Image: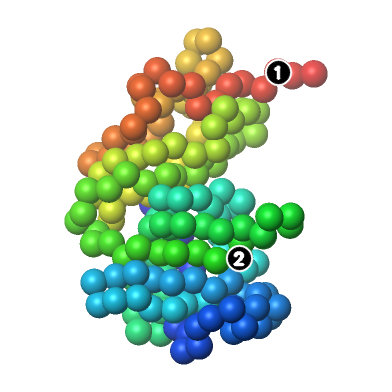
Amino acid sequence: MAQIVVKAEEQRETGSAPSRRLRGAGRVPGILYGPSGATSVSFDAREFRNSFAGRASRGSLVSLQLPSGPRLARIQDLQRHPVRREISHVDFMEIDKAEIITASVGLDVEDGLTLQMTSIDLVGPAGAIPGSLAVTMDSVNAEGNVIVSKLALPKSISSVLDADAVVATLTPVE
């Protein structure tokens, strides 16, 4: 499974006033911290929100598509407007694909199931961690639950949660 892809632009201006102008234009300012230093970036707010389906959080992996080339990063910090809850700034930390990390991964649920959690933490090489995990009816056990051990994880990836932790339940038919 692929990482979440976000098209970003490198910015030259930094500070409060340029950030307000970016937000007014429907973009979100951010900073990408990496081995070569910090780079100011911005990206479309709507595209970012739709890519994450409202599940963007600290630890989520992102493939930033910059004009200088793609970079794998994780969300280090996510700031939201205090009233509107819109994302107002994101700090990214560039990572190496072979580095062993813990990342928060969103869950995609199939109709007929109710999620008990919206994301789970996975451990493994950064390049192998999926952008999201599918929770399907095939994973339901005899009690009507989907547990962590029934999720289809890539070979080199493991969950931080206990194997018996419930991630989804069957939705009662009314």
Q: Which amino acid does label 2 sit on?
A: Ser
User: Label 1 belongs to which residue?
Assistant: 172
Q: Where is mark 2, residue-wise?
A: 88
Q: Check the image and report above or below for 99 versus 156.
A: below
Q: What x and y, as percent, mark residue 89?
A: 55, 66
Where residue 141 appears, as percent x and y from the top left, is 48, 16
Residue visible at 61% across and 21% down in the picture: 170
Q: Callout 1: helix, strand or loop?
A: loop
The secondary structure type at the circle numbered 2 is strand
Residue 105 in view, yes or no: yes
Where does the C terminus fall, quadrant-wise?
Answer: top right
Q: Where is residue 59 in the image (x, y as percent from the top left)?
A: 41, 50
From the viewer's perspective, is 55 left or right of 63?
right
| Residue 154 visible to an observer of this rendering | no
124 horizontally vs 16: left or right: left
Q: How would you rate the neighbour count of disc 2 (Cα within 10 Å): few for under 14, some for 14-19, many for 20 or more?
A: some
Residue at point 49% right, 39% down? 119
Mark with earlier residue (1, 2): 2
Residue sitting at x 28%, y 62%: 95
Q: In which quarter of the image is residue 169?
A: top right
Q: Spot the residue most to the left.
A: 98
